[in-house]
Structures are given as C-alpha cells and as structure tokens.
C-alpha cells in the first residue's frame, strides 16, 4: 500500500510499504471495560546480507546472520486507553522512520501517536541507515558503480513498514491477560566506561588493568526492569530493561547482541514462542567491560554469558513480580532543545576527513568530529525536538521513555524522584541524536561529550520534564 505521511521537517513523502497482514482496525466490544488486555508480536527486520552495518565509524558490510534482527511489540489496553511499546534490534532509530511508522501504526490501529513508542535496543551489529556516514558511503558507491550494490532495499521505508506491521499484529492479538511488573537486581554488571585518570583527565574505555586509572567517573545502575505477560496462566512474552551497551560482539554478522541470549534463556523456561522484548536503560556511559581484570569482553561467548546471566535474573525474579492493577494514563511532551553550532572551518575540515573513516592512521577523534559536524549541518536547524513520554500502568508502576543515549545519572535521578515505587526508564526512544551527557560530564570531556549533538543542560531539562509528568500521573 502507499501511505502519504509527513517527515520530521513536515515535508510530504511517499512510503512504499508492503501489504500488512493480520491487521485489525475494529475496536473490541469490551473496549469500555476496565479489564486488562495485552497482545504481542514480532517481525523480522533483517536487511539482505551485504548491507552496511552500523555501530562504528568505518564501512562494514554484513557477511551473514548470526540471529535475525527483530522488531517486537507489546500492546496493552485498559478500557479505551491503549499503549504500544515497540523495540527494534538496532543501534538507534531515526526521527524520520519513527514519525512515519507511528503515524501509520496509529492510522491502522487507532492507538494515539503519543501512546506509541519505538525504541532501539542499541545493538551495534545491525544496519546503517539515516546517517551521514551512510550518505557518504552511498554517494561514493553510486559515483563508482552507477548504483549502490550494498543497498538492495531502502531500509528506512522497509523498517517503517515492519514497525507498523508488528504494532498491527500485536493489536490484533489483544485478549484478556495478566501483566506482572517488578525490578530485579543484576549483580556483577554493568560498569561505567568513563574513568578519572592520574593525569587529571577523563577517559572512556581506558583498557583493562590500566594502572593510570584512579576511579570511575560516574555511577552504574543494577536495576533490571521486568514486565511479564501471561495468558491462561502461561507466560507468552515480556519486556526486560537493562542499562548496558549492547556492544559485546563486533564482527560482520547481523545480531541482536546479548538481548538475543536473554531471549534464548527465557525461551528455555517459557517455550519457543515466548516473545522477549528488550529495552535499553540509560546506558550512554555504561558497558560490560570490567577494567579491574584481564578477561575477554567481545565475542558471542561473552555475549551469551552476559545475556544468560540477565535472563536467569529475570527468571529468578518471577515469583517476586507484582500483578498490574491497571490504571492506565499517559503524558507526552516535546522539548525543543538547542543543538551545538558548527563553524565553517570545522565543517570544511569535516568534508575532507569524512573520506578517511576507514583509515586506521587517522586519529579517532578526527573521525568523530567529522561525522558530528556533517550531522549538525544535515539537521539544518538550531533546535531539535525531543519527546518525553510517561505511562502509568498502575498506582505503583510507571514507564518513562526518552530519546538519545542517556547518561545513567539521569535515569537514576528520575527513579529517585519518581512518586511511583517501580519506575522503568527506557532510552533511545523515537530518535537517537547521539549522546545526552550530564553538565558535569561536559566539563570533564572525552568521547561522549565530543560526540554529543546537544548543548549542555539538555539532559537536565529532560529529567525535570519527566519528573513533572510522573507527578502529574500520580495525582
């Protein structure tokens, strides 16, 4: 079907979307009741092998599929209030894609756009799209070959269609359900990847057993947010939220990273059809690397070990989860936050340096600054829309959804100030304009701050807004 939708800049565009199956636009007769209903679905979003991969700065082409990339949806309904939580095995989702996907999903299902969340798991072994790196590589390929042999499909349109399909199918699967919620504790991970060094500076990922490390430059979050959906006393799926970079594999095979192994662990307990969705907590400065020991931290064996541990934590917590006594409500606010400026000199340098992304002799931060400058130019504006969504599930449970790669301190601050006993904070929702560091981190510098597109104070403004919305929903 063809759907005329709007881009984030308000320009009409045409998306050619494949036919959606298992669609349902009719409202159920008992929609006015207070009974809790839930539906889940998953759809494959793996691009063809050979497609460019995201996660790093060089040009990587996929050589295979370790495990299919998925988009997974949970639709919850109480009375006339519906919420759709969508999770994609991608490093990030662009505002371009989510604007179109949410609009189409809303048109088909009737779920308000403001009640639809499209989040990324932050897997670093997914496709590259809607990015200035992709734009450069794509243009170069066309100039060389007359076409781009590595793009058999236009992924943004494909992805928007898949998201609409998974929301439609989850909505069609709505039926009476029980939803349990809780927060478990994961021991032994994650780790803050920013460290104070003996030279007085802050470094990210300074290496294991580095004797120049003084102490971590930030906290960690051991919370594991859990939602479990049960129908007829059988667990059919759920959501796990954990704050740790999904960057434990590298390589050139498509993979969901450690969330895949969370799924495998849960499927061993609940059955092969269990749908395991994963949300990235506020993990902008958190990863799996313990600098105090010398041990492997990359590869599928490491990823399996981490995902299995988290999956077992979810299983161990099942008896301690509390049933949701549904009292759904939602709030959504979009802040227009200031972008950093790029001067003409830096932009000229960026246009020269973008050609050296694959050159190992070029300093890493030269590449970072080049991509950042070109990205800011491409945005073509001084401010950027950043949407904060808050959902009340019941009097004790709330879910906060934030865009960007959020520093962990922000998530901790929201949870500490929240009037709800159980507050689950999910990042990289609806958009990913790179990192959202704290004002203190901006002063200290290093990779995440150099790479951030937003001005200092943006994250603090988002936290203030999220807390305000939480308090409104508690009344």
Image (spheres, grey):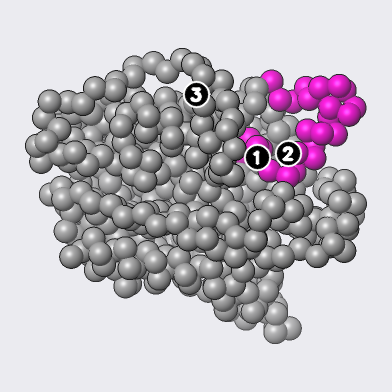
- Under circle 2, the secondary element is helix
Q: Which residues are magenta?
A: 125-152
Q: Is 447 drawn above or below residue 154 in the view shown?
A: below
Q: CA distance from mark 1 to mark 2?
A: 7 Å
- Under circle 1, the secondary element is loop
Tag 1 and tag 2, C-beta contact below 8 Å? yes
Q: Quadrant of residue 155?
A: top right
- Which disc number belongs to residue 223? none
Q: Nearer the viewer, residue 343 or 207?
A: 343
What residue sits 56% from the left and 51% below the top? 432
Q: Which residue is mark 2?
A: 134
Q: Which residue is mark 3?
A: 3
Left or right of 334? Residue 303 is right
Q: Quadrant of residue 96?
A: top right
Q: Nearer the viewer, residue 384 or 365?
A: 384
Left or right of 239? Residue 193 is right
Q: Is residue 382 visible?
A: yes
Q: Is 148 drawn above or below residue 280 in the view shown?
A: above
Q: Earlier in the sequence, mark 3 or mark 1?
A: 3
């Amino acid at each position: 079907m063809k759907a005329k939708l709007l881009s984030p800049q308000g320009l009409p565009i045409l998306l050619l979307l494949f036919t959606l199956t298992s669609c349902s636009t009719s409202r159920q007769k008992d929609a006015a009741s207070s009974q809790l209903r839930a539906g889940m679905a998953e759809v494959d979003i793996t691009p063809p092998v050979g497609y460019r991969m995201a996660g790093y700065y060089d040009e990587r082409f996929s050589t295979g599929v370790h495990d299919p990339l998925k988009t997974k949806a949970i639709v919850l309904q109480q009375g006339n209030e519906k919420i759709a939580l969508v999770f994609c095995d991608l490093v990030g989702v662009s505002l371009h894609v989510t604007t179109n996907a949410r609009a189409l999903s809303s048109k088909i299902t009737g779920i308000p756009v403001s009640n639809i969340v499209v989040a990324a798991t932050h897997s670093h072994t997914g496709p590259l799209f809607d990015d200035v790196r992709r734009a450069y590589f794509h243009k170069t390929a066309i100039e060389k070959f007359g076409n781009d042999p590595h793009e058999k499909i236009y992924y943004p349109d494909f992805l928007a269609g898949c998201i609409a399909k998974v929301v439609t199918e989850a909505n069609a699967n709505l039926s009476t359900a029980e939803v349990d919620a809780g927060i478990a504790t994961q021991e032994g991970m994650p780790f803050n990847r920013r460290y104070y060094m003996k030279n007085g500076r802050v470094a990210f990922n300074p290496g294991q057993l580095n004797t120049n490390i003084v102490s971590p430059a930030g906290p960690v979050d051991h919370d594991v947010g859990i939602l479990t959906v049960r129908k007829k006393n059988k667990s059919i799926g759920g959501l796990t939220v954990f704050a740790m970079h999904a960057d434990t594999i590298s390589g050139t095979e498509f993979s969901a990273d450690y969330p895949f192994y969370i799924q495998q662990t849960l499927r061993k307990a609940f059955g092969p059809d269990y749908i395991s969705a994963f949300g990235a907590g506020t993990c902008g400065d958190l990863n799996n690397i313990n600098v105090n020991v010398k041990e492997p931290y990359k590869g599928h064996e490491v990823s399996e070990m981490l995902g299995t541990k988290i999956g077992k934590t979810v299983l161990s917590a099942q008896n301690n989860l509390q049933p949701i006594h549904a009292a759904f409500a939602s709030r959504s606010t979009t802040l227009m936050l200031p972008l950093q400026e790029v001067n003409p000199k830096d932009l000229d340098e960026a246009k020269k340096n973008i050609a050296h992304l694959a050159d190992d002799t070029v300093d890493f931060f030269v590449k970072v600054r080049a991509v950042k400058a070109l990205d800011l130019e491409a945005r073509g504006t001084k401010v950027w829309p950043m949407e904060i969504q808050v959902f009340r599930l019941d009097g004790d449970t709330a879910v906060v959804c934030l865009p960007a790669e959020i520093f962990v301190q922000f998530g901790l601050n929201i949870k500490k100030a929240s009037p709800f006993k159980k507050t689950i904070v999910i990042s990289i929702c609806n958009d990913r304009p790179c990192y959202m560091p704290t004002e203190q981190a901006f002063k200290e510098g290093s990779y995440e701050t150099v790479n951030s597109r937003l001005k200092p104070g943006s994250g603090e403004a988002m936290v203030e807004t999220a807390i305000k919305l939480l308090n409104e929903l508690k009344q």
